[in-house]
Image (cartoon, rainbow, N blue to C red):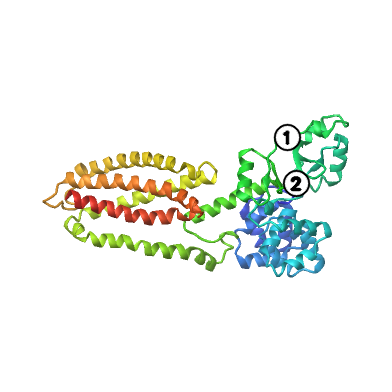
Amino acid sequence: MSSSETEGHEPVDTQTIVDALLSHSDQEILEISKRAHPGDIEQAFERLDEEEREEVLSRIPVDVLSEWADYLPPSDVEHRLQDLSEKGKKEVLESFADDELVDFLQEVEEVDRPQYIDLLPDEKRQISEDLLQYPEHTAGGRMTMAMAMVEESLTVKQALDELEPVREDIEVLSRIYVVNKDGKLIGNIRLRDLAFNAWNTPIESLLDSDHFSIQAHEDQEAAAQMMSRYDLMTLPVIDEEEQLLGVITYDDALEILEEESTEDMEKISGIGGERELAYLQTPALVHFRRRFGWVLILAFLALISGWVWLKYESIMKAYFILALYLPMVVAAGGNTGAQSATMVIRAMSLGELGPRQFWRVVWKEFQVGLGLGAVLGICVALQVRFLLPAEWVPIPDDVGALQIAMVVGLALTGQIVTSTLIGGSLPILARMLKLDPAVVASPAITTIVDVSGSIIYFSLAQLLF
């Protein structure tokens, strides 16, 4: 986000902002822009549909757009820029923080990008071109060059003199990175080290060499995880020669974690593609396109369950009481399998698990599944044996309630054990095959365990009857 300080802002209820934006009053929009923080404006914008956003954007003046630019979706900013004069466009583009400007340029059509870059002042243009060489979802693509950096050869006084002219442009001043004469990162110092030491103290004597850094081409999620794990306000980004390129700040790390969490959650639900806009801002056709593929594939996979039922049609006809408990057995497997997959995927996303822990995960999920399955199986078996009213579903003469209880109880136990093993192992197997673990989660696992549950259930019935 922008490093600029916003003065006079206060927390404002989101609905109050929405009402002001939709008031069709230029005065109310101007007043809410002075009261509300741009972060609250961003949240309010997520509740507006496309027509409402266009109406609001057409009413806001250039200075307000400049203040909001870091917080609004790039597509909305670009849409508004098209109606501005060249002077207005320059003002808005120059108001962007370095990292947010690069995010904006990455989002616009490649053919339109040069016209925006040409409007930038020389220094900002050079920074943007340097940052644009890194892919969007890498550490380099998310870093900012607005950082505090000094050379090791300086004294405290010299370092303060160097930082003073650029202090307003630096996003986080609490950590100051120290480089050698070749620009190689060698450590960091804190602002308080400069504030509470004599002016002639050499910087190298204050140096904290126990620093963390990440390569520019590393994935952005790895950067955010490092910052969370080591409680960092900023994370330096370096190249192959360990030269300092920029930093990722804590607010960008929060955004990355939110994006990755949202992406994993949607993939777990079988939603493809990448979510770039808020729910209401995403066209219905895009929602349809992202969901249709998995729904179609899983619909055809579910036909296997029908084939299993058809194969065991004679068992179902002869012992119709089995139909009463089949949905429960199948659903229990889907629920426990999805639970296992969710926990394993979360552990993998946090770096707690990897392919080497595959058999440990299998063993743990087997123990959990066996415990859950045994307890649930016994409970349901006791219900069948002693609490099932005979008038509900007549029990065939050639089998007793005890046999029905055994089939249901054992099938439920077997289904839960199988489902937890499938749910726990599939994400890790996907990672081994260089696939995204989230895509094999909830809907796929539910379909798979539907089939396995039907096979286990009817096979046990055929064996015991």
Label 2–label 1 contact, CB within 8 A: no
Q: Position of residue 239 (x, y in %)?
A: 71, 49
Q: Is residue 260 left or right of residue 307?
A: right
Instruction: Please report the residue visible at 75 percent of the width from the left and 42 percent of the height from the top.
Output: 185
Instruction: Please report the residue visible at 34 percent of the width from the left and 52 percent of the height from the top.
Output: 331
Question: Observer-nearest residue: 297 or 362?
Answer: 362
SS class of the residue under badge 2? loop
Q: Position of residue 285 (x, y in %)?
A: 53, 68
Question: Observer-nearest residue: 242 or 237?
Answer: 242
Instruction: Please report the residue visible at 86 percent of the width from the left and 29 percent of the height from the top.
Output: 198
| Amino acid tagged 1 | Ser
Question: Observer-nearest residue: 150 or 29?
Answer: 150
Residue 168 seen in render? yes
| Amino acid tagged 2 | Gln
Instruction: Please report the residue visible at 75 percent of the width from the left and 46 percent of the height from the top.
Output: 243
Q: Earlier in the sequence, mark 2 or mark 1?
A: 1
Q: Is residue 68 left or right of residue 349?
A: right
Residue 174 seen in render? no
Q: Is residue 336 left or right of residue 48?
A: left
Identity of the residue furthest to the front in this view = 241
Where is residue 119, by image quadrant?
bottom right
Q: Is residue 291 left or right of residue 31?
A: left
Circle 1 is placed at which residue position?
Answer: 209
SS class of the residue under badge 1? loop
Q: Position of residue 428 (x, y in %)?
A: 47, 48
Q: Which mark is residue 243?
A: 2
Crowding at dot 2, Cα within 10 Å, few <14 / some 14-19 / many 20+, comes out as some
